[in-house]
């Protein structure tokens, strides 16, 4: 009997130990699970071997800009400069010579003052130089003397007859700068009424003298004289403008007629009919003659 009681006690103790062991194991597992869930989430630390080198790091915005600019600088195509013409920029190359692209206005060599285009440059103003530029009123009231002096002061010369006509007719050798057909819309010609009739209707044309032909109001009348290059179709492939129309232009040379040295000027003014185009030449007036319709442009020999 005592033997069976002793065995029962032993079994009970073993059972308690087993239950306690099971409970302890479950408690430990629960604690581990709770610890894992409540632990802060931190990224793993990268080792030195796996980290990126400094020079390959993603650039900042400033680094991007510098990098892009540097790339653009090195990869930009080379600029192709235009072929040198052997002429100043305000002149066009024609054969062996250069000619002003636009009729000239006058500027004082010393102080840069622009001479009024509607007033005659007197003999006392021989310090004026010719300047060729677009979008300005060209100088009128010029004699061959003042035209030659102005070109010389600019380091240039008056154009020769064949030079002027070659530039006017263009590479295609046409009658007018723009072609072979007269077109008063392309060049500044055929303005009506005739400007002297507008200002001096009571004086017959043949009785009008220097006072009428050099009246300072003539070139200020709207709708007659235009700025250089305004008639942009009055040109040719050489890129010279207004060689027919706007103003007639003094050239080099002349001839003696009836004991008086005569100068030459070319082309029609705005008041002319413009029928002869580049072939119009006038040799009747003395080299010191001037009126509202007379201007010039200059030439030089090309440097190459």
Image: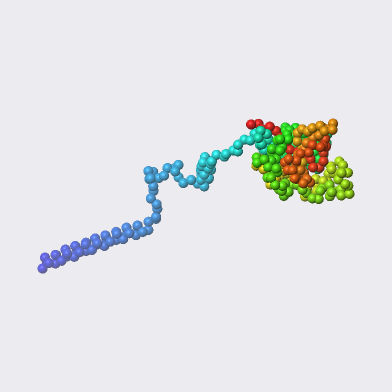
Most foreground residue, 245 or 83 = 245
| Residue 3 appearing in the image | yes
Residue 50 sits in quarter: top left
Residue 278 at x, y percent in the picture: 72, 41
Q: In the current view of this chain or complex, which residue is farthest to the bottom?
A: 1
Residue 54 at x, y percent in the picture: 44, 42
The structure residue drawn at horizontal position 87% and vertical position 42%, both measured from the top left corner, is 209
Most foreground residue, 294 or 106 = 294
- Judge left or right: residue 71 versus residue 53: right
Q: How is the image coloured?
A: rainbow
Residue 93 at x, y percent in the picture: 66, 36
The structure residue drawn at horizontal position 79% and vertical position 32%, both measured from the top left corner, is 255
| Residue 225 appearing in the image | no
- Judge left or right: residue 235 versus residue 12: right
Q: Quadrant of the C terminus?
A: top right
Number of numbered callouts drawn: 0
Most foreground residue, 300 or 284 = 284
Residue 284 at x, y percent in the picture: 81, 37
The structure residue drawn at horizontal position 71% and vertical position 38%, both measured from the top left corner, is 165
Most foreground residue, 299 or 168 = 168
């Amino acid at each position: 009997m005592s033997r069976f009681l002793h065995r029962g006690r032993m079994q009970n103790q073993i059972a308690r130990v087993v239950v306690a062991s099971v409970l302890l194991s479950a408690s430990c597992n629960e604690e581990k699970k709770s610890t894992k869930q409540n632990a802060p989430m931190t990224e793993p630390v990268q080792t030195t071997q796996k980290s990126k080198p400094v020079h390959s790091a993603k650039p900042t915005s400033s680094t991007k800009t510098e990098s892009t600019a540097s790339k653009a600088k090195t990869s930009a195509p080379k600029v192709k400069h235009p072929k040198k013409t052997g002429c100043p920029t305000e002149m066009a190359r024609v054969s062996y010579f250069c000619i002003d692209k636009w009729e000239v206005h006058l500027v004082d060599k010393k102080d840069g003052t622009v001479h009024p285009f509607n007033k005659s440059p007197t003999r006392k103003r021989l310090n004026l130089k010719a300047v060729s530029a677009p979008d300005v009123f060209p100088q009128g009231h010029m004699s061959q003397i003042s035209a030659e002096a102005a070109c010389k002061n600019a380091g240039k010369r008056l154009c020769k007859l064949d030079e002027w006509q070659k530039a006017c007719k263009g590479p295609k050798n046409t009658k007018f700068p723009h072609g072979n057909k007269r077109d008063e819309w392309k060049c500044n010609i055929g303005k009506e009424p005739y400007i002297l009739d507008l200002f001096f209707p009571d004086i017959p044309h043949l009785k009008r003298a220097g006072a009428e032909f050099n009246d300072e109001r003539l070139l200020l009348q709207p709708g007659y004289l235009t700025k250089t290059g305004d008639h942009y179709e009055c040109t040719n492939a050489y890129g010279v403008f207004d060689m027919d129309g706007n103003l007639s232009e003094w050239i080099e040379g002349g001839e003696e007629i009836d004991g008086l040295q005569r100068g030459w000027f070319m082309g029609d003014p705005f008041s002319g009919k413009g029928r002869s185009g580049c072939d119009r030449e006038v040799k009747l007036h003395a080299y010191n003659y001037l009126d509202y319709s007379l201007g010039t442009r200059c030439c030089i020999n090309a440097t190459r």
